Image (tube, grey):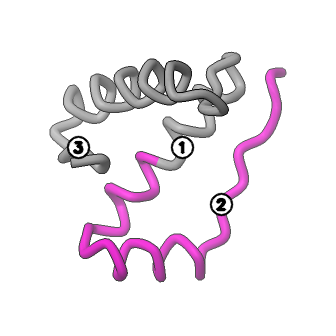
Amino acid sequence: MLGDIVLAAETVVREAALEDKPVDDHIIHLVIHGLLHLLGYDHETDAEAEEMEAVERAALARLAIPDPYA
């Protein structure tokens, strides 16, 4: 087992509303983001962030979810 991914429902709903995006899309993005952390990705440096966000964007695009960083 790699670890756990935990989401706070109230926070997810609030963030989705603030960012004007569907809650389901935001949940999927957060799960992908968390999974990438479990797989060793990080975003402590600009280079790491660019790499991680590129993988997130590709995964979300395959699911027809808009780029959350656009």
Image check: 9 left or right of 53? right
| Image height of 22 relative to 48, above or below | below
Query: Label 2, label 3: how many angstroms apart (C-alpha)?
Result: 20 Å
Query: Label 1, label 2: how many angstroms apart (C-alpha)?
Result: 8 Å
| Residue 20 part of the magenta segment | yes
Residue depicted at x 38% and y 72%? 16
Range shown magenta: 1-29
> What's the residue type where badge 1 is placed?
Val
Image check: 42 left or right of 32? right
Give me the disc on residue 21: none
Check whether the beta carbons of the residues at disc 1 and disc 3 lie within 8 A of each other. Answer: no
Tell me the residue that label 3 is attached to.
67
Residue at the outermost front position = 46
Image check: 32 left or right of 59? right
Image check: 37 left or right of 65? right
Check whether the beta carbons of the residues at disc 1 and disc 2 lie within 8 A of each other. Answer: yes
Give me the disc on residue 7: 2
Tell me the residue that label 1 is attached to.
31
SS label for mark 2: loop
Going from N to C along the chain, the mark reached first, 2 or 3, is 2
| Image height of 45 relative to 10, above or below | above
Q: Where does residue 3 sit, x and y in percent of width and height?
A: 82, 31
Crowd class of label 1 (few under 14; some 14 to 19; many from 20; radius 10 Å):
some
